[in-house]
Image (spheres, rainbow, N blue to C red):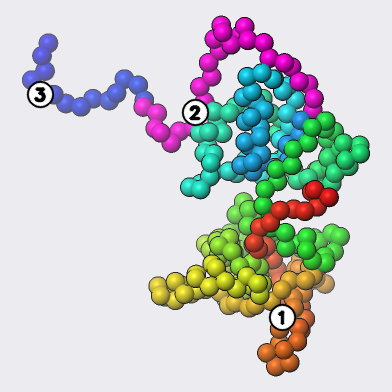
Amino acid sequence: DVLVEFSQVPGRSRMVSEDDAFALYCFSRRISQTRRAIVNSQVVVVGASECGISAIEQLLCSSDVEFTSVTLIAPGGITVGGAGSTYSSQDISKIGLEAQVSMIDAEMIGLDREAQVVYLSTGVSISYEILVLTAGLQDQALKRITRSAEIDAPVVTLEELVSELEPSFAATLSSCIVYGATLEAYQAMEVLTARGCMLDAITHVLPPEGHVGPSFVVPVLAKKIELDLPDTEIMTLVKVESAAEGSAVSATFTYMSADTMENVMATRSTQLLVMADAKDVDISLFE
């Protein structure tokens, strides 16, 4: 039969878009006959940074050695990706981590080098024979200050804010402090307002040494496009503890007095403290 008029019809099979994550594994006779040295040593990789993913990729893709026991400690899971990232979601899928690596969603809080034991935030301890520390850059502001041993009040990072902030809770906030002079600090403020927090309830505190870069450029750009930003103060965070109210946090800052030119301490009680300071290496992991 010959069609008088050609018309488009649905394809016989669905075309997979380029954005879909995929992984194609091939097992040939040549591969089955290739002998690799078996290494049963317990390998523990701390941190799912790009460095950590790269280390695991080298372990799993070695043509000479097969590592049978690899554990990845990744709080929050694998979050690499983005325009400036080496690994995309497709790349992660191709490595096949779920089939060859034991993943633990926890944070490393202690390390006993003599006993070769890693202590996790879940209360679990893991023994290791080979330890790879690839925690990447983290917000170290809380580790540089004095704080209570246990803080029940909400002190969160940007990642925790994005994943855990409920609109019902954000709408009830009457005071919130975002600490840091990074783009992440402005992202945290955007998350807060997008989920119902009033703009006048947010205070942006900049450390003195960070009053450059994004904290200088963003307000200028915001003014040009007539975008309102929260009130800004320049102070250094020195202490964090639970407030007397129980559900709030008490944050102590120091700042330079314009009258006496001396450091003055100021304590603020807030319902939520968001840490978004410049990221750095966690020195305690290597001590």
| Image: magenta residue range | 15-42
Is residue 175 something one can see in this rendering? no
Q: Main secondary structure of the magenta part?
A: loop
Q: Are marks 2 and 3 in contact (CB under 8 Å)?
A: no
> What residue is rendered at 20% in x and 27% in y?
8
Crowding at label 3, few (<14), some or many (≥20) Cα neighbours within 10 Å? few
Farthest residue, direction bottom: 259
Mark identifier at residue 30: none
Q: Nearer the viewer, residue 67 or 81?
A: 67
What percent of the width, then of the height, locates residue 223?
44, 76
Residue found at x 76% / y 34%: 44
Element type where label 3 sits in the image? loop
Q: Nearer the viewer, residue 210 or 235?
A: 210
The residue that mark 2 highlights is 22
Give the left or right position of residue 203, taking residue 286 as reference. Answer: left
Taking depth in this image into account, of 273 and 5 the one nearest to the observer is 273
Q: Is residue 29 above or below residue 6?
A: above
> In the picture provided, is 242 more to the left or to the right than 139?
right
**Label 1 environment density (alpha carbons within 10 Å; few <14, some 14–19, many ≥20):** some
Q: Which residue is mark 3?
A: 5
Q: Is residue 25 above or below residue 76?
A: above
